[in-house]
Image: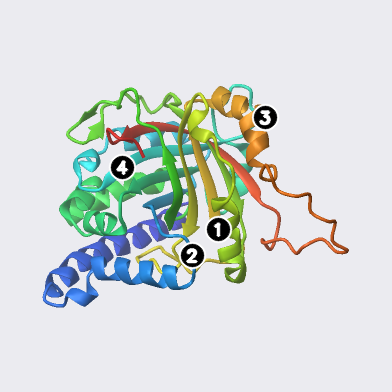
Amino acid sequence: MKQSILLLIASLLTTHAFQTGITSSRSRATAVASSGPLFSAVAEEETAVKNDLLKRDRYVATNRFTVRQGRAAKFEKRWADRSSRLAELDGFKYFQLMRRVALDDEANSGIDPLASTNPFGNYVSFTIWNEKKDFNAWRGGEAFKEAHGGTSLFAFVTTMVKSAMVLTGAPKPAFYDGLLQQSTIPDQVPETVNGWRSVEADGVNLLSSEAFIACNQFFVPSSNAVAFENRWANRTSKLKECEGFISFSMLRRDIKAKGHGVSPMGEEEPTYVSTTVWKDRQAFENWKNGNAFKEAHAEKKGEEPKEQPQQPPAPLWSKPPVPVFYESTLVISSPDGA
């Protein structure tokens, strides 16, 4: 175990050096506008339009963690106690810390037992930004350093040692274009202090669940991406009319994203993830068993019945979708929602 902890600390130290390099490199590049994050975001959007892909509505940054057995409450306490100005930053929309749960768990609390065998972990930090340039500004600024242990190397190492005691392996970041964004205006925005939630955490008990998240992972080859996105864009959706609905986003993996810990995406990772946030599990169950679900998964009204082809059309994905469920805590929202 000592060896694995040392390896994890070494990996996370590289993260600190990389992030410091981002800040210095950007300051040296201010005279070269075409190399900045805004130019990159615009260039990517132009490429997406040319390829008939849907335009990005939001930018979503996630980090996936594998928390050691019995250390979940300590991991959540570290998040609750951190220093962060997230809610005060330009372009911030929504944050939640997601812990994976099993759908057949009646208590709907605790870690999905299958998650311990999943290479992508049992916790996910999930942040929605209005634009990619907003995320880049945060990642290259002082607020990022403060949230990850402070601006000194000593403070960072201290934070990373604590992380190594609760994690198995290094975090696995993944970034997405948020498509077809839908959200409701929250009745009440969670209170924050200096940009972060003030929540009591004892490191023994899990934090209370504040929302329920239903995800569906899709493994879509790039050759089918346009058809897949069009199919979703043309669906009938009445999510906003459903009691307890908070937000929806079809996440398209940003394979161009760079940074320490960002590995080339393998075939075992989904290229798209539908992510729907509900007030609680009961709201999700009500939608799943109601008419809105049936209409969203049926053919459009008014369409002529299609003749049965001699051979069924080829699926748009390389393997069947994989549903994954989470409950979230430490929710932070902008006044106008996600």
Does residue 128 sit above or below 186 in this rendering?
below
Left or right placement of residue 234 versus residue 302 in this view: left
Q: CA distance from mark 1 to mark 3?
A: 30 Å
Q: Are marks 3 and 4 in contact (CB under 8 Å)?
A: no
**Residue 223 placement (x, y as % from top left):** 60, 71
Task: Classify 10 Å Cα crowding around label 1: few (below 14), some (14-19), many (20 and above).
Answer: some
Q: In this figure, which residue is indicated by the disc labeled 1?
A: 229
**Residue 323 placement (x, y as % from top left):** 63, 44
Q: CA distance from mark 1 to mark 2?
A: 7 Å
Closest to the camera, between mark 4 and mark 2, is 2
Q: Secondary structure at mark 3?
A: loop
Earlier in the chain: of badge 1 and badge 2, it is 2
**Residue 44 placement (x, y as % from top left):** 37, 69
Earlier in the chain: of badge 4 and badge 2, it is 2
Closest to the camera, between mark 3 and mark 4, is 4
Q: Are marks 1 and 3 in contact (CB under 8 Å)?
A: no
Q: CA distance from mark 4 to mark 1?
A: 23 Å
Q: In this figure, which residue is indicated by the disc labeled 3?
A: 104
Which residue is nearer to you in this view: 242 or 6? Answer: 242
Task: Classify 10 Å Cα crowding around label 2: few (below 14), some (14-19), many (20 and above).
Answer: some
Q: Secondary structure at mark 2?
A: loop
Q: In this figure, which residue is indicated by the disc labeled 2?
A: 53
Q: Secondary structure at mark 4?
A: strand
Residue 307 visible to an observer of this rendering: yes
Q: CA distance from mark 3 to mark 4?
A: 31 Å
Q: Secondary structure at mark 1?
A: helix
Q: CA distance from mark 2 to mark 3?
A: 36 Å
Earlier in the chain: of badge 3 and badge 4, it is 4
Q: In this figure, which residue is indicated by the disc labeled 4?
A: 93
Earlier in the chain: of badge 4 and badge 1, it is 4
